Image: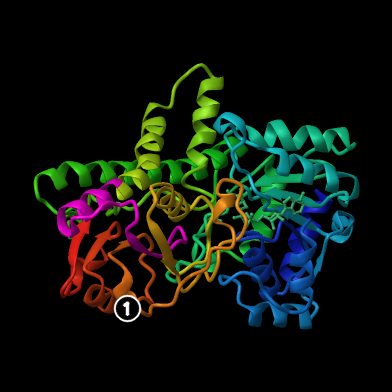
Amino acid sequence: MQSVKRIVQKAENGSLTAAVIGLGYVGLPLALALADAGVKVIGVDVDPSKIRILSQGESYLTTAPSKRVAAAIASNRLVATTDHAAVASADATLIAVPTPLGAGRNPDMQFVETTVRAIAPHLKKGSLLSLESTVYPGATRETVLPILEAAGHEPGRDILVSYAPEREDPGNSNFALADIPKVLAGFDAASQEAANAVYRLISPSIREVSSLETAEAVKITENVFRAVNIALVNELKHIYGKMGVDIFEVVDAAATKPFGYMPFYPGPGLGGHCIPIDPFYLAWRARQLDTEARFVELAGEINSRQPEIVVETLERALKLHAGIELEGASVLMIGIAYKKNVNDLRESPGLEVMSLLRRAGAKAEYHDPWTPSVGLTRQYPELAGLASVPMEGLGKFEAAVIITDHDDIDYELLAAEIPLIVDSRGVYRNLDGRAAKIIRA
Ligand SMILES: NC(=O)c1ccc[n+]([C@@H]2O[C@H](COP(=O)([O-])OP(=O)(O)OC[C@H]3O[C@@H](n4cnc5c(N)ncnc54)[C@H](O)[C@@H]3O)[C@@H](O)[C@H]2O)c1
């Protein structure tokens, strides 16, 4: 109990020290938010290049501007290190490391496990350990607690434990960390109280839930909800397409209903670290419990077919409207990032579409103002080094495919210069298509 009081007091009087482990899309904005709230933050990452960049007061993420990093580093509110032992001085340690899929689309918890193992010997007695990474219900109790116990810490007594799922949507200018209520569960009442005090510093409100598993299920539910609804609207797109009805017009009109409907838009497939991955965490857990996640599996199947559907639509449109084959056609892909106004290529359907186009023998290039070039990815190593082409000399392209609806693209210029556009994002629904033939995909 003494330790809870100390954490609450320190949070209130501005003398709290926190460690954030994993300085990626989630961890870096989290570290900056804590630093802005007056917390002394120790940022830990295994990637030395990230630590070097941060220590120079710069950033590698468009969603965490260099100006904020520079201010946090200059004021000593943020120090960055690769050394896990630095958590020794932290009153609270927050973990935001990846939770990808492993073989067979099963949860890969190795980053969480390695992290907890690396910090466990150094954690200060009476400090709080909070997991932010997305995991399946049961994961904190089953993976984090045993590692703490093996290191000689009794959860709830020596180390307070909470699960606090990160709900941020990087690049969303309407909702930043400071606008999103925090869902929070403590291992016990003391852990909850300590976690409340820490997260109150950076969250507009806190929604306590009754168990670690409930908090884990909340996060998974939010992302399953998105995956299933996106699959539904992708399916409706095809059905309505056969009827000559435009799905975007339907969704926009349905969204005028002030209750009982929430708009989701179709697209070229799912991307990012969350929506394509998290539902499989639940499906895996369901299988372990001898039950099924049929909706979730079906949504995964429908969504992962979308990149192929875009390419098939382009192939048909080229034949019908230009009288040419996809093989040998000059195609400009607009956007390669998985969503608008970010440079995030993780799980991006843009990579899949580019790979399919090239395999089909198309002369495919891309333009993406946010992604000047494609780095090395595990799934598409053949695309490494591919660079964004300028929006010049567009006349040489026989078709364009809209993959990402970035704001700073001159869509009217595109439609004035390229005769055929396959639009998977509905960007032309409110724009003048000019000379181009616009085909929905
Ligand atoms: N990106 C999102 O939009 C988002 C939103 C909500 C929740 N999440 C969840 O947050 C978690 C982190 O996602 P992210 O997008 O920030 O991932 P990321 O890949 O951008 O960042 C993770 C960071 O952790 C570092 N790391 C890996 N192992 C480490 C270790 N042992 N010690 C220290 N650092 C280590 C990596 O070098 C990397 O910098 C995931 O569980 C994800 O599902 C992500």
Secondary-structure class at tag 1: loop
Q: Is residue 258 visible?
A: no
Q: Is residue 2 above or below residue 285?
A: below
- Of residues 149 and 5, the one nearer the viewer is 149
* Residue at 53% from the left image edge and 71% from the top image edge: 372
The quadrant holding residue 394 is bottom left
- Of residues 432 and 164, the one nearer the viewer is 432
Q: Position of residue 427 (x, y in %)?
A: 27, 66
Residue designated by label 1: 410
> Magenta segment: does it hold 326?
yes
- Of residues 156 and 93, the one nearer the viewer is 93
The quadrant holding residue 52 is bottom right
Q: Is mark 1 within 8 Å of ligand 1?
A: no
* Residue at 36% from the left image edge and 59% from the top image edge: 403
Amino acid under disc 1: Asp
Q: Is residue 159 visible?
A: yes
Q: Position of residue 406 (x, y in %)?
A: 39, 70
- Label 1 crowding class (10 Å Cα cut-off): few <14, some 14-19, many 20+? few
Q: Position of residue 151 (x, y in %)?
A: 89, 37
In this rendering, position of residue 21 left or right of residue 33: right
Residue range of the region highlighted in magenta in the rendering: 312-339
In this rendering, position of residue 60 left or right of residue 246: right
Q: Residue furthest left?
A: 243
- Of residues 9 and 383, the one nearer the viewer is 383
The quadrant holding residue 38 is bottom right
